[in-house]
Image (spheres, rainbow, N blue to C red):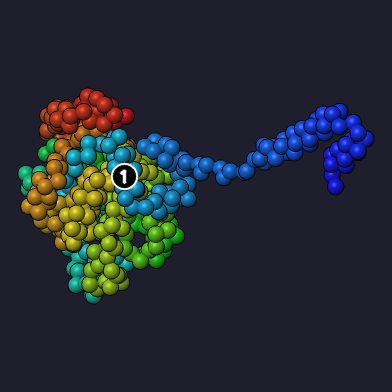
């Protein structure tokens, strides 16, 4: 029996009923209040899960930086595709007119006989018997000039020339001088000029700069870890050394890679990370889908899907916001829908014409129809490149050997920039017209 009940019984038995009832009432109230306060005590706090932190790349979406970690790039790359495309498209619109796509033409000015053993390339002398590729001489100056004229008349604004060399050091001075003169002549047409000639010395890079070269292409191909499975006649560091010579000469850097070489997703991440952590982002990043060529060691390699290309484009756009991302080899079997998604994700250049070096390419008329359907328009030559070096920021600064037409082309750039409309970041057209770049 409780203490309250015992106390009540003793009071009642003493005959003091009135007083006992009063005392009993007070005792019950004390007991009730005590138990009630215990029942209504504050519940113990329950530990809540901390809110997930927002990744830096999302917090700083669109910020230009070269301190990306490989894990960060992997996180971008592995983002669900539609979300990744959305974020990439958002970055693209911060810096670029999404309706403007540059059309470029690539010509092989010296085909076959290359001493390198890149497993994907038909021009290597190591498997020329299997590919049937014969070494040809360097094309004549006039023949190249006429090809550039045709490309310009067809709407291309950048003319790219490739030579199957290890580098200019392997050829005679007369051939080297001919290439320099090709650059001067084509610059006189008011076109941007890009070359890919193999490994360069600082002196050769300087000579290209003086001839008026806009950009130099030297692809890294894949990640540093996978590179030795692609070629053994040069090292990854050789590629980086050439890019440094190009950059130090004041020439814009064009460097990208190839997907579909048998690499894994981690190698695609490694390639993009390498490009995004160069001292400065490249002016251009070409992304190629392997075109497997009979007779090469990779002849049986299946091409990557179009959406694989889109994922790489979107990742490159997020980590290199101002760089021109160029759809290069391997467009021929892409659907128009795949290409449209790539443009949405940030691609803003294509190579047109019936051939890219030695591989077939999309027909120009098909590309024009695609531009019409998607509402795209061609980028004029020499609009400022925000990630470019001096050679692609204004026509006059690109070199002293531009020949005739330099001044008139610079004058044409301003109204072309104005035609872009609002441009990027507001007032982008006015910035472009004075060569101030974007943002």
Q: Count neighbours of disc 1 (C-alpha within 10 A) and say few if under 14, some if 14 to 19, many if 20 or more.
A: some
Where residue 223 sits: x, y (%)?
40, 57
SS type, badge 1: helix
In front here: 103 or 217?
103
Identify the residue shown where x is 21% and y is 34%: 383
Q: Which residue is mark 1?
A: 86
Quadrant in the picture for residue 203:
top left
Q: Is residue 299 above or below residue 28?
A: below
Where residue 171 sits: x, y (%)?
26, 56
Would you say residue 205 is visible in this rendering?
no
Identify the residue shown where x is 27% and y is 71%: 299
Identify the residue shown where x is 19% and y is 69%: 133
Extreme right residue here? 14
Where residue 272 sits: x, y (%)?
38, 50
Would you say residue 366 is visible in this rendering?
yes
In front here: 361 or 304?
304
Quadrant in the picture for residue 407:
top left
């Amino acid at each position: 029996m409780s203490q309250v009940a015992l106390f009540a019984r003793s009071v009642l038995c003493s005959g003091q009923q009135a007083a006992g009832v009063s005392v009993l009432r007070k005792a019950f109230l004390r007991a009730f209040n005590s138990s009630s306060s215990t029942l209504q005590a504050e519940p113990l706090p329950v530990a809540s899960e901390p809110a997930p932190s927002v990744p830096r790349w999302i917090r700083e979406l669109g910020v230009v930086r070269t301190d990306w970690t490989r894990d960060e790039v992997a996180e971008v790359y592995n983002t669900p595709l539609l979300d990744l495309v959305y974020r990439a498209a958002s970055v693209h619109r911060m810096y670029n007119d999404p309706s403007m796509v540059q059309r470029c033409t690539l010509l092989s000015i010296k085909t076959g006989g290359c001493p390198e053993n890149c497993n994907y390339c038909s021009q290597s002398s190591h498997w020329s018997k299997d590919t049937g590729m014969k070494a040809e001489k360097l094309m004549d100056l006039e023949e190249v000039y006429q090809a550039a004229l045709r490309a310009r008349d067809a709407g291309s604004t950048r003319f790219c020339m490739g030579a199957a060399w290890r580098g200019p050091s392997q050829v005679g001075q007369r051939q080297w001088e001919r290439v320099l003169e090709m650059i001067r002549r084509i610059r006189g047409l008011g076109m941007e000029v890009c070359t890919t000639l193999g490994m360069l010395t600082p002196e050769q890079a300087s000579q290209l700069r003086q001839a008026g070269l806009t950009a130099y292409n030297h692809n890294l191909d894949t990640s540093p870890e996978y590179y030795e499975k692609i070629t053994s006649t040069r090292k990854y560091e050789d590629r980086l050394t050439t890019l440094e010579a190009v950059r130090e000469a004041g020439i814009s850097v064009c460097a990208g890679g190839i997907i579909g070489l048998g690499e894994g997703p981690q190698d695609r991440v490694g390639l993009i990370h390498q490009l995004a952590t160069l001292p400065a982002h490249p002016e251009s990043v070409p992304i190629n889908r392997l075109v497997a060529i009979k007779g090469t060691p990779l002849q049986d390699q299946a091409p990557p899907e179009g959406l694989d290309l889109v994922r790489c484009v979107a990742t490159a756009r997020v980590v290199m916001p101002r760089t021109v991302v160029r759809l290069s080899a391997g467009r021929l079997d892409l659907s128009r829908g795949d290409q449209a998604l790539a443009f949405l994700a940030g691609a803003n250049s294509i190579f047109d014409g019936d051939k890219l070096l030695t591989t077939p390419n999309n027909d120009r008329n098909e590309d024009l129809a695609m531009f019409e359907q998607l509402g795209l328009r061609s980028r004029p030559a020499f609009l400022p490149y925000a990630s470019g070096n001096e050679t692609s920021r204004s026509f006059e600064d690109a070199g002293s050997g531009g020949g005739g037409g330099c001044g008139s082309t610079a004058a044409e750039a301003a109204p072309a920039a104005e035609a872009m409309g609002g441009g990027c970041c507001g007032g982008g057209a006015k910035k472009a017209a004075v060569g101030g770049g974007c943002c």
